[in-house]
Amino acid sequence: MITSFDELDLTKQYTYADYLKWQFQERLELIKGYIYKMSPAPSRRHQDIVWNLNVAIGNHIKGYPCKAYSAPFDVRLPIKDKKSNQEITTVLQPDICVICDLTKLDDRGCLGAPDLVIEVLSPGNTQREMSQKFNAYEESGVREYWVVYPEYGHVNIFLLDGDRRFVGQHPKVNGEILRSVVFPDLEINLSEVFVD
């Protein structure tokens, strides 16, 4: 059992089975077996944006057979049909995720791709980390992926196409209405999300 983050070898690849044995306070994600340390506590602005999106999405999905979750919430993305803890090497904690296939939910979180994933960027997010997450969400079949840029007040939206590749949409900026494709009648006024 590992009780300190410092005991981990950051050059080594790990699995979800390893992840379950770690007993320390630091939050982290696994992407293809490699460890990415998360910020200990997001900024107040980050939290405000997540809350505002949560309220809008939560109110909307009441009429759907779907569930929404906020970090910390483990999303395990198996490779193809490999679903054992020893074979899962990607465990992410998106800021918000919505799952409509409720069979993917268990006491540990979500096993498989959510329908909608939202990541609100923090100053600590690296380009490499975001590129790896993009690839992991795309490969696993996340249908809609939003990347929120608090500093600039805009949202980049990616939709999974028929070839299982993300296609970027025109960015939505503060003051515009963001419309979901997965939930066609979900409309969010971004001026109510990027509130100071």
Image (cartoon, helix red, strand yellow):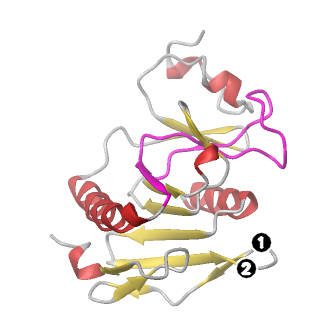
Q: Is residue 80 above or below residue 150?
A: above
Residue type at numbered disc 2:
Asp
Q: Is residue 116 above or below residue 174?
A: above
Is residue 32 shown left or right of residue 61? right
Residue under label 1: 164
Which quadrant does the C terminus fall into? Answer: bottom left
For label 1, count other residues whose C-alpha is less than 10 Å away and answer few (under 14), some (14-19) or many (20+): some
Residue 57 % position (x, y): 36, 65
Start and end of the magenta stretch? Answer: 65-94
Q: Which mark is residue 161?
A: 2
Q: Magenta region's main secondary structure? A: loop
Q: Secondary structure at mark 2?
A: loop
Nearer to us in this view, 119 or 59: 59
| Residue 125 at least partly seen | no
**Residue appearing at x 57%, y 13% in the figure:** 2
Residue type at numbered disc 1:
Arg
**Residue appearing at x 43%, y 29% in the figure:** 26
